[in-house]
Amino acid sequence: MFRDVSSCNTYNYGDALYWDSRYIQEAGGAFDWYQRYSSLRPFVRRYVPTSSRVLMVGCGNALMSEDMVKDGYEDIMNIDISSVAIEMMGRKYEFVPQLKYMQMDVRDMSFFPDESFDSVMDKGTLDSLMCGTDAPISASRMLGEVSRLLKPGGTYMLITYGDPSARMPHLNRPTYGWNIFLYNLQTNAVLPLHAMGCQTQW
């Protein structure tokens, strides 16, 4: 399994320094990769109950979690490799108890015990790792951690511009035991956007 360049336009996406620099330049702005929550809502609400404990990986400075709270979600832990993004978002949502922020690398989430979350949301984070030179190793480490953190019956929701044929070998491993479902999302982008749900066994 090699690095997937089908949706890459830079090789710096797996580097914390790249993201720190980017968020400093954006100076408090917000940016949602791929789609806003309103476009993804039917898919999210179908597989992630509002009572779920949600882990948002690679949260950046996106409004996704804020929009989910407005839609009734009660407990969202947001992590990102960039300390700049986490500090900024932590200040912004200091008085929103449903949102928590922590600097963390998705390849090592050992801070959390096994089976900590009902759902893990990923809007572009695996895609970012797949643009790096150590993509197969990074993807394996990240997905191994996602699998460890999901409760029985939990769902890993991947929003990706990657070709499903390039993502499936990473997701469809017997050790995860995931039931995988694929949706094609309608967008105006040149590349097709996919939603891939990976559900653990009860």
Image (tube, rainbow, N blue to C red):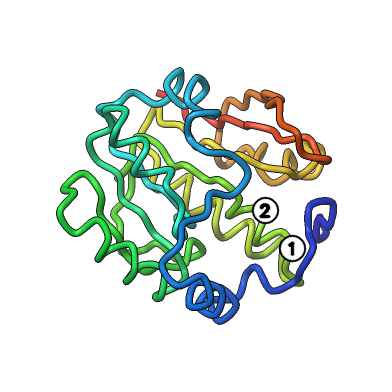
Q: Relative to residue 195, is residue 110 depicted above or below?
A: below
Label of residue 131 in the image: 1
> What is the quadrant of residue 132 in the picture?
bottom right
Tell me the amino acid under the disc marked 1.
Cys
Tell me the amino acid under the disc marked 2.
Asp
Residue at 30% over, 60% down: 101
Residue 163, horizontal then vertical, whole percent: 80, 40
Alpha-carbon distance for marks 2 and 1? Answer: 7 Å
Residue 102, horizontal then vertical, whole percent: 31, 64
**Quadrant of image for the C terminus:** top left
Check contact, mark 2 vs mark 1: CB within 8 A: yes
Q: Dot 2 corresponds to which residue? A: 127
Q: How many marks?
A: 2
Task: Tell me: 36 left or right of 111.
Answer: right
Q: Relative to residue 134, is residue 29 depicted above or below?
A: above
Task: Tell me: 197 left or right of 201.
Answer: right
